[in-house]
Image (cartoon, helix red, strand yellow):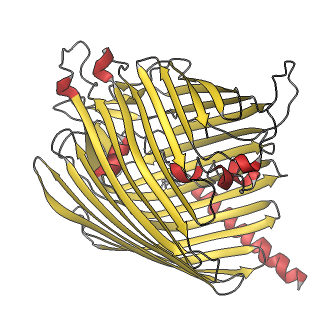
Amino acid sequence: MRSKRVTIRIGFLLIINALVVTTAFSQDQPNDREWTDGTLEDVQIEIIKDRQITLPAANRNFEKIAPQPAEQFKPSITYNFRPFNFQAPEISPQIRPLRLKQEDNSRVYGSYVSLGYGNYASPYAEAFLNSRKDKKKLVGAHAWLKSSAKGPVDGKNSGSGTSGASLYGKAFGDFISASGKVGFENIATHFYGYPAGEVVSRDAIRQSYNLFSLGGEIANTRNTEFQYSLGADFGHLTDHYSAKETDVDLAFRSSYRIDEETAIELGADYAVTSRKDDVIDAKPRSLFRINGDYLFSPLDGLQVKAGLIVAFENDTLDSKDIHVFPDVHATYSLSPTIDLVGSFTGGVDKVTLHSLVRENWWLAPNIPIYHTNRLFEFLAGINARLGNQVEVHAGLAAANLKNLYSFVNSADDQSKFITVFDEGTVKRNNVYAALSYAQSEKAKFMVRMDYYTYTAGDLQEVWHRPTYRLSANAFYNIYDKILLKADLIMQGGMKALDQPSAEVIRLDGAFDLNARAEYLFSDSFSFFVQLNNIVSNEYPLFYHYPVRGMQGLGGITWSF
């Protein structure tokens, strides 16, 4: 019996090895962020302190580096001025600041207000207000202002910022939980990618987006054999000109646990989007996706999820309205600390004006928009845990993509971007590796490296997508009195098309170093200083769009 089990395991390892080698040496099989975020919602993670401390420290840290590949669809690098707060270690520096008293669990703060100001005429204000700890409900509000009146090109001609407010709540019943949210956001910017030396009116290059959102979800409260959730979201977007878009999403997720090793999952979502612009009449675009999976364990240490994804869509770019994709995922435990992972899947990825604005604020009017068809995506990787403090993830992936979009500067106005879609098959390969370390909330360090290759289909190139990206961040707490944070982002390899000359432009890479220090005057009041782009590298977000140089921000935070 033991001999048979060993034989099975060796056979499985040989199969995994063959798949990995085949993928590594094949340029015909490629991979998918964005920078995106997935994204967990701001309001449900960052502000509920009692919920954070219920999570295992190691898992929370490691989840910040996803073990799967992720393409950075959003090449821009943004800064988050929100204060961070975590309990950390006692260390032994030469200078010992006064230590704060041990926090009383009965005085867990669920709200804060933070105010600050920085160079480039940058006011900052943010507030989270939440109800007190309650097992039956949570109600809260979030409001923020993050703006810079001046930018990297001609002062106020490149000013930008975001502001908004949202309300959210969740109620827990004996059998059903319900949650809801409503919010408004404004994004303001200028088309500052005009030719150098050209005299322009600031009002003539102004752009802004107003986004309204409304959503809700119900789910069963208890952990039973049958789990379900049903959600709905509504969104409406308008810009400074004539663009309008309305988006409605419905989503259903369910699972039925047959026994400890076997389960059935069924999910479906429906999205309908209607957009209107100067020369575009409102016409609904529909996308319906349904997936079913069977989870089982065919042998010791091997867990498999196998099923299908079926998508129905009415985009005119595709000749077919119905698409069927495999949905297979496997995890094999080589040991209690080492897992081999693999997947073979596909799908139709939703693309809307709303999602494109999140990536690029400088879009031209009346751009074409179509969903992306992931014909297939293959992944093989390894996840390892080295004790309780270190995790390592590494792997490679390949994907074939149809109707993949790229951003290209308009031939009529270089400061605005149009979308071009590759109707052929784009092949994308990705190799990734990640390392994370956590010393029980005392010190944290994470680093991840991604490398991509693209082979365009019908187009000349895949435009404005980085081919490498390195990200790292570290946290350090000195006697619960001084909180330190540092981030490093490096990415590059992007290409752009100069339409007048038809020349391929290789954009400079990004090197962005950021640091933050926060001093706790008391357990509820602190002062912070944040420096972004410390080396003042004015790398381009997109062609003709450099970022600001070094940015400094100082402020105070009051928790209550």
Image quadrant holding the C terminus, namely top right
Q: In the rendering, at what x and y percent does residue 308 appear?
A: 48, 77
The image position of residue 519, as x and y in percent, is 69, 25
Q: Residue at x 21, y 27 (%)?
A: 205
In this rendering, the answer to whether 117 lies above or below 3 is: above
10 with respect to 505 (left or right): right
- Compared to residue 524, the image places residue 105 above or below, namely below
Q: Nearer the viewer, residue 293 or 202?
A: 202
Q: Is 391 situated above or below 289?
A: above
Is residue 78 shown to the viewer in this render?
Answer: no
Residue 396 in view, yes or no: yes
Q: Percent position (x, y) of residue 411?
A: 18, 33
Q: Nearer the viewer, residue 282 or 126?
A: 126
In the rendered image, which quarter contains the N terminus? Answer: bottom right
Task: Give the left or right position of residue 465, taking residue 202 as reference.
Answer: right
- Rendered image quadrant of residue 297: bottom right
- 315 versus 245 height, above or below: below
Considering depth in this image, is 167 or 89 the residue closer to the camera? Answer: 167
Looking at the picture, how far across and down is residue 505, in whole percent? 35, 28
